[in-house]
């Protein structure tokens, strides 16, 4: 079961699409939206990340930083970000470090035995790194509740 509201978000260091490390604890003092998604270049993931892209100015106006996280390698994430004009970092969790820490692993993704990816999950962290909102969709083909995410960011 994914981490719940009130839990201190586990720290991680993951590579962005330019293969530069991003460490969660370095973002203390800002609100953070972590959007775990199953795979680049899939329809629902594209719709989700483009929705965050289109809402980024509003989220940053609320002192929030957005990060997509997938098990794809940095090269795939970079191509996906470029193809979709994604204007926030997509982090590569190929080793499943954060996916496992947040307990959002999706085993046998797309019916492929042994392929582990992330479920579709969104966490909103406050400025101290505490999870204040968590949503895990039961079906990875369903987009998250954006209104609830944005409301959670604005309530902090």
Image: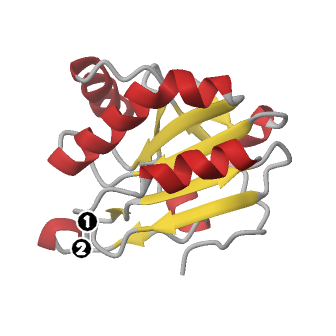
Looking at the picture, tell me which residue is in the foreground, 95 or 58. 58
Residue 137 location, x and y as percent? Answer: 38, 69
Q: Is residue 36 left or right of residue 3?
A: left
Indicate the secondary structure of the residue bearing disc 1: loop
- Residue at the bottom extreme? 1
Q: Residues within 10 Å of mark 2 (few under 14, many from 20)?
A: few
Q: Residue at x 38, y 60 (%)?
A: 120
Residue tagged by mark 2?
108
User: Label 2 vs label 1: CA separation?
Assistant: 5 Å
Looking at the picture, tell me which residue is in the foreground, 62 or 21. 62
Residue 129 location, x and y as percent? Answer: 79, 50
Indicate the secondary structure of the residue bearing disc 2: loop
Residue 45 location, x and y as percent? Answer: 27, 46
Q: Are marks 2 and 1 in contact (CB under 8 Å)?
A: yes
Q: Residue at x 78, y 33 (%)?
A: 26
Check the picture and name the quadrant holding the N terminus.
bottom right
Residue tagged by mark 1?
115
Q: Is residue 122 above or below residue 109?
A: above
The numbered dot on residue 60 is none
Residue 73 visible to an observer of this rendering: no
Residue 99 visible to an observer of this rendering: yes
Q: Residue at x 58, y 64 (%)?
A: 134
């Amino acid at each position: 079961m994914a981490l719940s509201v009130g839990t201190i978000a586990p720290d991680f260091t993951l590579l962005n699409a330019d293969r530069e490390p991003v460490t969660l604890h370095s973002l203390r003092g800002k609100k953070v939206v972590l959007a775990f998604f199953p795979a680049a270049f899939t329809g629902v993931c594209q719709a989700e990340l483009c929705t965050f892209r289109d809402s980024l100015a509003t989220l940053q106006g609320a002192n929030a930083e957005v990060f997509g996280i997938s098990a794809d390698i940095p090269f795939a994430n970079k191509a996906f970000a470029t193809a979709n004009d994604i204007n926030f970092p997509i982090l590569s969790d190929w080793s499943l470090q954060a996916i496992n820490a947040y307990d959002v692993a999706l085993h046998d993704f797309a019916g492929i035995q042994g392929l582990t990816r992330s479920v579709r999950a969104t966490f909103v962290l406050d400025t101290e790194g505490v999870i204040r909102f968590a949503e895990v969709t039961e079906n990875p083909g369903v987009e998250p509740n954006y209104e609830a995410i944005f409301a959670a960011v604005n309530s902090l």
